[in-house]
């Protein structure tokens, strides 16, 4: 499985969220919890948008949103999660490290 980050998404996460491509990729490598599906009406997609929260190698937590197609993960966005996102992920994603 490859993580695909388009130039547009890379620019977006860098300029809006101060997240590097490297940090987003590290989160895929460091994920210990499950994947959740974004079921909010304005975020529904086909294939569905999946998300998780994981630390970078420097222990910065990021929420990572992506879609899976043909065995690859296409990044949609990555940013520091808010308190509600952390609460949801801790309850349903069951991470072992935060």
Image (cartoon, rainbow, N blue to C red):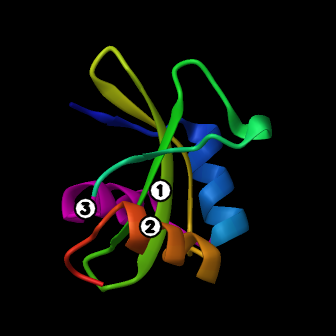
Q: Which residue is found at the position 29% from the left and 67% from the top?
A: 94
Q: Which residue is mark 2?
A: 89
The quarter of the picture where the N terminus appears is top left
Is 21 on the left-hand or right-hand side of 82? left
Q: Which residue is mark 3?
A: 31
Q: Earlier in the sequence, mark 2 or mark 1?
A: 1
The quarter of the picture where the C terminus appears is bottom left
Q: CA distance from mark 2 to mark 3?
A: 12 Å
Q: Which residue is found at the position 51% from the left and 77% from the top?
A: 87
Say few, some or many: other residues with alpha carbon within 10 Å of mark 2 (under 14 / 14 to 19 / 20 or more).
many
Q: Which residue is mark 1?
A: 64
Is 71 on the left-hand or right-hand side of 7? left
Q: CA distance from mark 2 to mark 1?
A: 12 Å
- Indicate yes or no whether the magenta region holds residue 20: yes
Tags 2 and 1 in contact by the CB under 8 Å rule?
A: no
Q: Which residues are magenta?
A: 18-33
């Amino acid at each position: 499985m490859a993580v695909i980050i388009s130039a547009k998404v890379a620019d977006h996460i860098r300029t809006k969220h101060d997240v590097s491509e490297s940090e987003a990729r590290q989160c895929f490598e460091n994920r210990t919890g499950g994947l959740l599906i974004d079921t909010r009406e304005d975020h529904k997609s086909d294939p569905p948008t999946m998300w998780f929260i994981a630390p970078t190698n420097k222990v910065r937590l990021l929420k990572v949103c992506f879609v899976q197609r043909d065995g690859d993960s296409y990044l949609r966005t990555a940013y520091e999660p808010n308190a509600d996102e952390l609460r949801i992920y801790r309850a349903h994603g069951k991470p072992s490290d935060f």
